[in-house]
Structure formats: structure tokens, C-alpha cells
Amino acid sequence: MFDAGWCGLYTKAVLFLHFRVSLLMPQPGHIYRHYKGAHYMVLHVATEVAETGESSKKVVVYQDIAAPEKIWVRDADIFTGELDHEGQTIKRFERAA
């Protein structure tokens, strides 16, 4: 028998997780400051597919504001991640605008 209550709860959980992930994912058109001070605009969040086609990962395509000819690609996990810098844990990129 189909349990409509469970289905509603599941749908709400999926929507919540999708919303939470979308908040964490860099947004195209927004400016981010690298921990070393440079500013970059996110152009796109793309999906990189492995050669086997079995797995994929999100990557961030971003452009240097000071040198627009420089376009970079980095794993989304690394872009949104933290690192140890001078004894402190900091974000690699933070949204600037």
C-alpha cells in the first residue's frame, strides 16, 4: 500500500537538501575572494564526467577579475572547501558580492 504521509515527508527532505546544497554551491555571476586576496567571478558550475562515464563531479569555472583572459576550473569540493593557512582553518574562497 502507498503511504502518502511518507511520500510527503520524503519530498520535503529532498527539497530541503537540494536547497541546502544550492546555497553551498558557488553561484554563476557572483564574485568570490580567494584567501590570498584576488577576486574571481564564477562563470558556471559544470559536471565533469569520468572517461568511463560511470561517475561525475561538479567543477567550478571561474574568471580572474583583474586578468579576464585567465579562466580557471577547480573541483567544486575544493572551491568551497577549507584549508590550513598560517595555523588557522579558513575558506579557500568567500563570496565577496
Image (cartoon, helix red, strand yellow):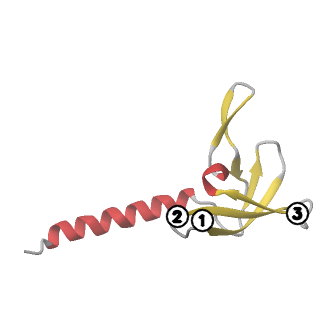
- How many numbered circles are shown? 3
Residue at 64% across / 69% down in the picture?
46
Q: Amino acid at mark 3?
A: Lys
Query: Of callouts 2 and 3, which one flags the residue occurring earlier in the amino acid sequence?
Result: 2
Question: In x, y percent, where is residue 28?
Answer: 68, 69
List the single residue furthest toward the front.
52
List the single residue furthest toward the left.
1
CA gap between label 2 and label 3 equals 28 Å
Q: Quadrant of the C terminus?
A: bottom right
Relative to residue 34, is residue 45 depicted above or below?
below
* 51 vs 29, nearest the viewer: 51
Secondary element type, mark 1: loop
Q: Residues within 10 Å of mark 2 (few under 14, many from 20)?
A: few
* 15 vs 59, nearest the viewer: 59
Q: Is residue 19 left or right of residue 29?
A: left
Relative to residue 33, is residue 46 depicted above or below?
below
Question: What residue is shown with label 1?
Answer: 50
Q: Give the quarter of the image for residue 71.
A: bottom right
Q: Amino acid at mark 2?
A: Ser
Question: What residue is shown with label 3?
Answer: 70
User: Answer yes or no: do the residues labelled 1 and 2 have beta carbons within 8 Å?
Assistant: yes
Residue at 18% across / 66% down in the picture?
6
Query: Of callouts 3 and 1, which one flags the residue occurring earlier in the amino acid sequence?
Result: 1
User: Answer yes or no: do the residues labelled 3 and 1 have beta carbons within 8 Å?
Assistant: no
Question: In x, y percent, where is residue 19?
Answer: 46, 64
Relative to residue 35, is residue 3 depicted above or below?
below
Question: In x, y percent, where is residue 94?
Answer: 69, 49
Question: What residue is shown with label 2?
Answer: 55
